């Protein structure tokens, strides 16, 4: 990461996680931490559920912060797992909630599969352990990773992904996530805007990323994260050019998961490059 990125700060941070998914803070503690960091507009974007939004909104109101209702949907495009952030969603929308219920059911099934595969590696009762690590009904690989560390099977979560949980590893379950067009449709039905999360993190060539974004836009996708918490130097400039060329909006978000979760800190973001339309303007929102 460039040294300038270490000094970066944005009062707007539109991607973070709470205990409602694989973050380590309650929604209240997350909002409070964001406020303390100087963030004034934040989106809570838990994986595949909106269970933390009501609490986050109460905490934000008390601190006179703006809380944007979000979600990060686990999706797939041509066998490539991708994440789609929905911002400005109505969490009461029935189409969105019915869709998220399907993803959560897949997560439950997958947890048992991961557990079965870990048992084959001599590690018993992992699903129960992972659920124990979770602060909500959402169980994900992060919870397995933390449990594997706690049990002494791995030194840190990154090792758990490298040895057991990552693609191609013994406990990897090929993920039957929601096709990209459906995830976009749910978000739009709920009145939200769909954003491709952390585009630099996928193993896609430049040509493939352009193809993904072109299809995403054709399905109604509105933007992409141009500035994100842990991206390589130069990614922001490259993604900003892509956003302008494809006439898509730009978003920015740390992808914060917790104080001890390494990489991303709340609000530690470089601004959107000049000329990139901010996603909130695309959504028709202005901040004071
Ligand atoms: P899941 O959605 O359950 O498949 O889990 C994906 C989540 O695992 C991501 O949102 C990250 O929070 C986390 N994750 C993915 N890869 C790694 C890694 N190599 N090290 C630590 N955490 C990871
Ligand atoms: Mn996560
Ligand atoms: Mn993600
Ligand atoms: Mn995320």
Image: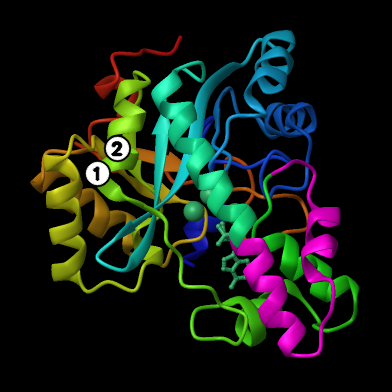
Q: Position of residue 260 (x, y in %)?
A: 78, 57
In this rendering, the count of numbered labels is 2
Query: Label 2's element?
Result: helix
Quadrant holding ligand 1? bottom right
Left/right of residue 181 with respect to residue 122 in the rendered view: left
* Residue sitting at x 78%, y 35%: 26
Tell me if mark 2 has few (under 14), some (14-19) or many (20+) residues whose alpha carbon lies within 10 angstroms of its own: many
Q: Is mark 2 within 8 Å of ligand 3?
A: no
Identify the image quadrant of residue 9: top right
Position of residue 130 in the picture relative to residue 67 (left or right): right
State yes or no: residue 161 in magenta. no
Identify the residue at horizontal 77%, vertical 64% (top origin).
Answer: 127
Can the viewer see residue 32 in this picture? yes
Give the extent of the magenta segment.
Answer: 110-137
Q: Position of residue 111 (x, y in %)?
A: 66, 62
142 or 100: nearer the viewer:
100
Q: Which residue is mark 1?
A: 181
- Residue 239, horizontal then vertical, whole percent: 26, 54
Rendering coords of residue 247 (x, y %): 11, 38
How far apart marks 1 and 2 lie (CA) works out to 5 Å
Image position of 198 (left or right of 257): left
* Prevailing secondary structure of the magenta residues: helix
Q: Nearer the viewer, residue 276 or 44?
A: 44
What residue would you read off at disc 2? 184
Position of residue 196 relative to residue 156, above or below, is: above
Q: Is ligand 3 within 8 Å of the beta carbon of the residue shown at mark 1?
A: no
The residue sitting at the bottom extreme is 121
Classify mark 1: helix, strand or loop. helix
Image mark for residue 28? none
Residue drawn at point x = 63 percent, y = 24 percent: 53
**Could you tell me if the residues under marks 1 and 2 are in contact, i.e. CB atoms within 8 Å?**
yes
In the picture as drawn, the residue positioned furthest to the right comes out as: 151
């Amino acid at each position: 990461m460039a040294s300038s990125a270490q000094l970066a700060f944005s009062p707007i941070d539109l991607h973070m996680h709470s205990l409602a998914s694989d973050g380590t803070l309650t929604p209240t503690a997350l909002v409070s931490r964001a406020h303390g960091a100087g963030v004034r507009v934040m989106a809570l974007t838990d994986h595949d559920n909106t269970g933390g939004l009501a609490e986050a909104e109460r905490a934000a109101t008390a601190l006179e912060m703006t809380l944007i209702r979000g979600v990060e949907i686990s999706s797939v495009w041509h066998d490539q797992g991708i994440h789609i952030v929905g911002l400005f969603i109505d969490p009461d929308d029935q189409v969105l909630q019915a869709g998220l219920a399907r993803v959560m059911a897949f997560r439950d099934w997958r947890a048992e599969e991961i557990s079965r595969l870990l048992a084959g590696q001599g590690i018993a009762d992992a699903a129960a352990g992972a659920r124990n690590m979770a602060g909500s009904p959402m169980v994900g690989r992060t919870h397995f990773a933390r449990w594997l560390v706690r049990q002494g099977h791995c030194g840190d979560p990154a090792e758990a992904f490298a040895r057991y949980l990552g693609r191609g590893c013994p406990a990897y379950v090929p993920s039957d996530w929601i096709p990209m067009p459906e995830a976009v449709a749910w978000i739009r039905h709920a009145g939200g805007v769909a954003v491709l999360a952390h585009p630099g993190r996928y193993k896609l060539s430049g040509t493939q990323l352009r193809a993904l974004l072109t299809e995403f836009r054709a399905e109604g996708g509105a933007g992409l994260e141009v500035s994100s918490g842990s991206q390589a130097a130069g990614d922001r400039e490259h993604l900003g050019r892509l956003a302008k060329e494809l006439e898509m909006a730009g978003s920015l978000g740390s992808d914060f998961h917790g104080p001890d979760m390494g990489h991303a800190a709340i609000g530690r973001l470089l601004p959107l490059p000049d000329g990139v339309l901010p996603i909130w303007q695309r959504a028709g929102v202005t901040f004071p």
